[in-house]
Image (spheres, helix red, strand yellow):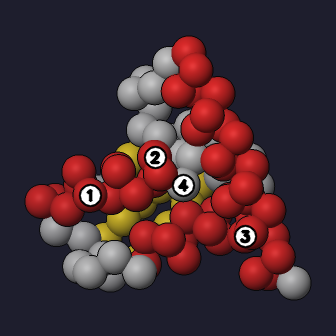
Amino acid sequence: MRIEVENIKCGGCAGSIRKGLIGLDGVDAVDVDIEGGVVEVQADDGLRPEIARKLASMGYPETGTVHGLKSAGARAKSFVSCAVGRMDKE
C-alpha cells in the first residue's frame, strides 16, 4: 500500500519510519521515498488504519489529515523521530 505523508525530511526520518512500521504485526516490508513523501508498505490492506495511526503518532501524518496546531505538533514529533533515526544510523 502507498501512503503519502507529511514531514519526511531526510534519511533519519526514513529510518525511524522503517523501524516503527516493521515492528507492527503483519508488516512485511517498508520503503520510504524521502523526496516524494511516500511510504510504501507491504502488508494486508486491512492494516492501513493501524499503519496510518502509527505514522501519525511518530509525526508523519497522512497528507491532508492534520491542520493548524495538530500540524505543528506532528511537525515537532517528526523532528524527534528524525533525530532518533539519525542516531540509530551512527
Label 2, secondary structure: give it: helix
The residue beneath circle 2 is 56
The answer to which of 88 and 29 lies nearer the viewer is: 88
Q: Residue furthest right?
A: 90
Residue 8 in view, yes or no: no
The residue beneath circle 4 is 58
Check disc 4 and give the amino acid type. Answer: Met
Q: Are marks 4 and 1 in contact (CB under 8 Å)?
A: no
* Label 2 vs 1, first from the N-terminus: 1
Cα–Cα gap, marks 2 and 1: 10 Å
Cα–Cα gap, marks 4 and 2: 5 Å
Residue at 46% x, 26% y: name it: 66
Check disc 3 and give the amino acid type. Answer: Gly
Where's residue 69, x and y in %? 58, 20
Label 1, secondary structure: give it: helix
Please say if 57 is above or below 73: below
The residue beneath circle 3 is 85
